[in-house]
Amino acid sequence: MRIDIITVLPELLESPLNHSIVKRAKEKGLVEINIINLRDFTTDKYKSVDDYAFGGGAGMVMMIEPVYKAIEKLKSERNYDEIIYTSPDGEVFGQKMANQLSMLNNIIILAGHYKGVDQRIRDYLVTREISIGDYVLSGGELPAAIITDAIVRLIPGAISDEQSALSDSFQDDLLAPPVFTRPSDFRGWKVPDILLSGNTGEIDKWRQEQSEERTMRLRPGLLEEDIET
């Protein structure tokens, strides 16, 4: 899989994408992640990629020309399954979407910045707009890193124990059950007896019940969404 991220602040993505599972997936050759500096595609001597909005108003807008050039260069080298724009008003990112995206071959992520991007970028260049939540950040770099991390960990081989990813919260529209490790008794705070019983069937049943209870208590909307679908 290949993920190309177009950004005006490449340094913001260097650390999140060079550690832990993402780093190991890159080293194994499971994913190639490229950070493309949008400023490399402007002819402005100051390397500017933003300008004032037509009609006035506060904030600067990312210009269409450097974005177009960056995307066209990438598309001239390979076909892309999705060209994603990170935006507060896009589809809300979730586990099901991460599952879908992890099965693709080539993705471009355009990290938004400033007041936003020229609308023509959204109308003619991107194929999907994704939001990580109903709030506004300084830029789309952190959302791009979050989306990338969520996708990469699902690629077969990225996690040594693939069952771990399949049992994550939200995979079955339920929150994950509580987990415990040694010691079994810490200052009188004890691990549930069922987890020490060795009875796999009963442990699985307990975990399912815990997932359902936690979801109903903490995120009942997930169950409602599952019923609707």
Image (cartoon, rainbow, N blue to C red):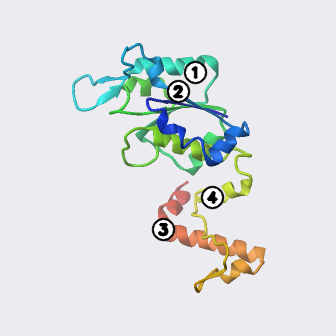
Is 204 displayed left or right of 18 in the figure? right
- Figure disc tally: 4
Residue 217 seen in render: yes
> Cβ–Cβ below 8 Å for labels 4 and 1?
no
In three-dimensional space, the C-alpha distance between marks 4 and 1, rounded to whole angstroms, equals 34 Å
The N terminus - image quarter: top right
Q: Nearer the viewer, mark 4 or mark 3?
A: 4
**Pointer 1 local density, CA inside 10 Å: few below 14, some 14–19, many at least 20:** some
**Pointer 2 local density, CA inside 10 Å: few below 14, some 14–19, many at least 20:** many
Q: Is residue 134 above or below residue 90?
A: below
Amino acid type of the residue tagged 4 in the rendering: Asp
* Image location (x, y in percent) of residue 129: 47, 36
Residue 129 seen in render: no
Q: Is residue 40 above or below residue 89?
A: above
In three-dimensional space, the C-alpha distance between marks 1 and 2, rounded to whole angstroms, equals 10 Å
Check disc 2 and report the residue beneath it. 36
- Say what secondary structure mark 2 lies in: strand
In three-dimensional space, the C-alpha distance between marks 1 and 3, rounded to whole angstroms, equals 43 Å
Query: Residue 100's image quarter?
Result: top right
Earlier residue among tags 4 and 3: 4
**Pointer 4 local density, CA inside 10 Å: few below 14, some 14–19, many at least 20:** some
**Pointer 3 local density, CA inside 10 Å: few below 14, some 14–19, many at least 20:** few
Check disc 3 and report the residue beneath it. 218
| Residue sitting at x 48%, y 24% | 125
Earlier residue among tags 3 and 2: 2
Check disc 1 and report the residue beneath it. 74
Check disc 4 and report the residue beneath it. 168
- Say what secondary structure mark 3 lies in: helix
